[in-house]
Amino acid sequence: MDYLSLTEARDALRKGETTSVDLTQAMLDRIVALDNDVNSYLTITDEMALAQAAAADKRRANGDDTPLLGIPIAVKDIISVQGVPNTAGSKILDGFVPPYNAFVVDKLEEAGAVILGKTNTDEFAMGSSTENSGFFTTSNPWDLERVPGGSSGGSAAAVSAGLAYAALGTDTGGSVRQPASFCSLVGLRPTYGRLSRWGVVAFASSLDQVGHFGRTVADCTAIFQATAGYDPRDSTSLNVEVPDFEAALTGDINGLKVGVPQEYFIEGIDAEVETAVRTAIAKLEELGAEIVKISLPHTQYALPVYYLIAPAEASANLARYDGVRYGPRAKGSDMIDSVKKTRALFGAEVKRRIMLGTYALSAGYYDEYYGRALKVRTLIKQDFLDAFEQVDVIACPTSPTTAFKIGEKADDPLAMYLADIFTLSVNLSASCGLNVPCGFDSKGLPIGLQLIGNTLQEATILNAAYAYEQATAWHKQQPTIGGNL
């Protein structure tokens, strides 16, 4: 039962071959057996999960068949679940228990999902490896000496290791797609505003978006379908109709125009990654897609633009953590000293980004740095708008490399930032994107294909990924950790 897909588990529940209580207990037992090695969870909500599972079984017995009824799912520890600690991976929020659910958690519960617990994350979602968590580092189930990616590394590792059937993450610069690539999962970053950010701890408010992890495209689509929707409490939430994404998975991509940007196959990309991605693009062509060479000329500016805009927004958002309203409060000789000592609880990467952002927003530098970055962001967005006049989908690598070793880039922030070089532009342009597994390197580490769609075109990229997935077998391979306990 450990490596069943979400849709397979759903079918088993519908046929009466198992119960939600049995699925949930098996998953909790597996977490106890394996998560000391993987370290994907910060909090395990076993009592709540079993109560939700029992309630789901009663609902099913009464004829209820809501989309995720009885399916055990994990939630990134930056997304509020009522009554459950929400640390955002930071010591400064240690002990904070939100009194309400995030919008997406309410949607999960309406759909009947069982919440297994909260997963590890880089502190305040700032990182590409989950090494920046204030508590511990998560390991990649494919190689425990390597990172699972970040910042949603805990969610990715949990699904990859068979410790959840699906999971919620967040994606500010690639934090769902990159760990999905490293862990051989489907990871979706929907259009900005497609899902409400209500109840999600803010990092960079113009870039943050809740995303989804699943073993298969159908799994990812099912949890996305359940959580999408308008929320008037979020001023950036899009009041648009939510289509039937699951019905859109036809697998027919005949005539689909797939753009291949020359700027995404650059010096420094791992040769095995490039070969696997180009082979995947050729498979899309074999399935009926038309391959078109395109250019996204301002791609080279995406990294510096992101690392001006995101830290600037972070410095504003994190100003609220003063030890008065949230988390622990350090004792000081006066209020200012107390706030200083409390804010010392931030980790090194968070401090680095706060300082970068505060500098970019400071008097005399705002126009030179932040203001100019916003202008270049508009150029990057226009690149995508121009491209989508020619093509339906853009195909490229998700990451320039496979998963790197824990500690390998810890002392080189720029090298770490470059891990997201192919994902940042999607967030800057408010497009949608996903990762789908497309191979393994010679070390047995997963490689991901990124498919990017225009605003609100999730159905298009999901169907393209589904067509590719159905024609290949990469998604059927599983890490050997634990086997079927």
Image (spheres, rainbow, N blue to C red):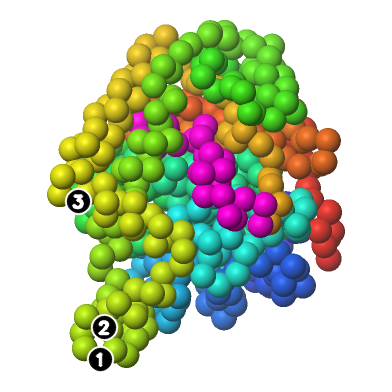
Q: Is the magenta region chiefly helix, strand or loop?
A: helix
Mark drawn on residue 333:
1
Label 2 – label 3 distance at C-alpha: 23 Å
Magenta stretch in the rendered image? 407-429
- Name, please, the residue furthest toward the left: 363
Q: Amino acid at mark 1?
A: Ser
Magenta residue check for 174: no
Label 1 – label 3 distance at C-alpha: 28 Å
Q: Dot 1, how many residues are within 10 Å of its Cα: few (below 14), some (14-19), or many (20+)?
A: few
Mark 1: which secondary structure?
loop
Occupied quadrant, residue 42: bottom right
Q: Amino acid at mark 2?
A: Asp
- Measuring from the top left, give residue 424's x and y in whole percent: 44, 36
Label 1 – label 2 distance at C-alpha: 6 Å
Mark drawn on residue 337:
2
Q: Dot 2, how many residues are within 10 Å of its Cα: few (below 14), some (14-19), or many (20+)?
A: few
Q: Residue at x 15, y 49 (%)?
A: 363
Magenta residue check for 425: yes
Q: Amino acid at mark 3?
A: Ser
- The one nearer the camera, 139 or 50, is 139
Q: Is residue 88 above or below residue 96?
A: above
Q: Are marks 1 and 2 in contact (CB under 8 Å)?
A: yes
Q: Residue at x 58, y 55 (%)?
A: 411
Q: Report which residue position mark 3 lands on.
A: 362
- The one nearer the camera, 365 or 161, is 365
Q: Dot 3, how many residues are within 10 Å of its Cα: few (below 14), some (14-19), or many (20+)?
A: few
Quadrant of the image for the C terminus? bottom right
